[in-house]
Image (cartoon, helix red, strand yellow):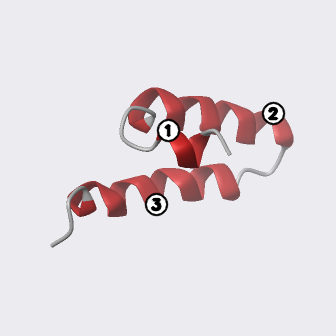
Amino acid sequence: MARGSKHHKAFLIDLERVDQALKKEAAELELNELERIRGDKYPIVIHL
């Protein structure tokens, strides 16, 4: 198993919340939460 892959599924679930937000404001809130929770492990993905 690749390093960090145990967090991969949880990250994708959180990222899906951003993608499925119905409004821009909701997506921004979800993205901020994603960054708060997973920003230390996935900074490049979040800041693209």
Depth-wise, is mark 3 or mark 2 nearer the camera? Answer: 3
Amino acid type at circle 3 is Leu
Of all residues, the one furthest to the left in this rendering is 1
- Above or below 20: residue 46: above
Q: Earlier in the sequence, mark 3 or mark 2?
A: 3
Q: Which numbered disc covers residue 12?
A: 3
The image position of residue 35, as x and y in percent, is: 52, 32
In screen coordinates, is 35 left or right of 27? left
The residue carrying mark 2 is 25
Q: Earlier in the sequence, mark 3 or mark 1?
A: 3
Q: Which residue shows up at 55% across the image and 53% down it?
A: 15
The CA span between labels 3 and 2 is 20 Å
Who is closer to the viewer here, 27 or 48?
48
Q: Earlier in the sequence, mark 1 or mark 2?
A: 2
In screen coordinates, is 19 left or right of 41? right
Depth-wise, is mark 3 or mark 1 nearer the camera? Answer: 1
- Give the class, few, some or many, for how many residues have Cα within 10 Å of label 2's Cα (few <14, many ≥20): few
The image position of residue 43, as x and y in percent, is: 49, 38
In screen coordinates, is 43 left or right of 40? right
The image position of residue 48, as x and y in percent, is: 68, 46
The residue carrying mark 1 is 43
